């Protein structure tokens, strides 16, 4: 099977795999090459897969959508972080997602200031009219 994990700005994984394990809203499931086609919503968690040589890989994903069509499995998610083992993945997720949360907080604050400025200008223009 071909696994592609996509985030809005990049392709995080593009690999040939023999097994995928992920978590949907109704629980964990496993995909192997002859599995039927389907679509499911993923919950935030760990996506686990095995490559052709038998090596295991782990990817932390935010909520998203998994689509299996034929021999291709595509996962579309807002955020994804790869790791070779769960321990290193946990620390990577903590640091990367914390940095993203800080950047989002700064962006939201700047947007709030811009919105407040627009409202003030609008109110001033109504007063002078």
Image: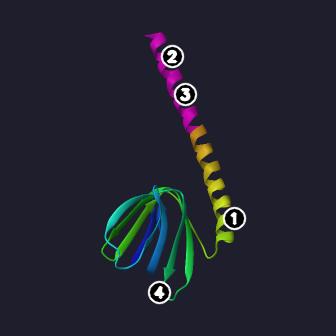
Q: Which residue is mark 3?
A: 117
Q: Is residue 114 within the magenta segment?
A: yes
Tell me the tag on residue 52. Answer: 4
Disc 3 to disc 1, C-alpha distance: 39 Å
The secondary structure that dominates the magenta segment is helix
Helix, strand or loop status at disc 2:
helix
Q: Looking at the image, is mark 4 or mark 2 nearer the viewer?
A: 4
Helix, strand or loop status at disc 1:
helix
Relative to residue 64, is residue 58 drawn left or right? Answer: right
Q: Is residue 118 above or below residue 25?
A: above
Q: Estimate how packed mark 2 is, as few (under 14), some (14 to 19) or many (20 or more) residues with alpha carbons within 10 Å.
A: few
Range drawn in magenta: 110-129
Q: Earlier in the sequence, mark 4 or mark 1?
A: 4
- Which part of the image, by quadrant, shows the N terminus? bottom left
Residues at discs 4 and 1 in contact (Cβ within 8 Å): no
Q: Position of residue 93 (x, y in %)?
A: 63, 62
Q: Residue at x 68, y 70 (%)?
A: 88
In this view, the residue in front, 98 or 117, is: 98
Disc 4 to disc 2, C-alpha distance: 66 Å
Q: Looking at the image, is mark 3 or mark 4 nearer the viewer?
A: 4
Residues at discs 3 and 4 in contact (Cβ within 8 Å): no
Q: Which residue is mark 1?
A: 91
Disc 2 to disc 3, C-alpha distance: 11 Å
Q: Quarter of the image holding residue 73?
A: bottom left
In this view, the residue in front, 41 or 7, is: 41
Residues at discs 3 and 1 in contact (Cβ within 8 Å): no
Tell me the tag on residue 124. Answer: 2
């Amino acid at each position: 099977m071909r696994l592609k994990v996509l985030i809005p700005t990049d392709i995080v994984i593009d690999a040939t795999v023999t097994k995928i394990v992920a978590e949907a809203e109704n629980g964990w499931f496993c995909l192997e090459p002859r599995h039927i086609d389907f679509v499911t919503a993923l919950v935030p968690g760990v996506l686990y897969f095995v490559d052709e040589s038998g090596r295991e890989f782990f990817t932390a994903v935010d909520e998203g959508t998994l689509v299996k069509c034929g021999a291709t499995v595509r996962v579309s998610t807002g955020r994804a972080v790869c790791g070779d083992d769960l321990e290193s993945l946990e620390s990577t997720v903590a640091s990367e997602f914390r940095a993203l949360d800080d950047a989002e907080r700064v962006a939201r604050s700047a947007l709030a200031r811009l919105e407040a400025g627009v409202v003030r200008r609008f109110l001033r223009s109504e007063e002078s009219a």
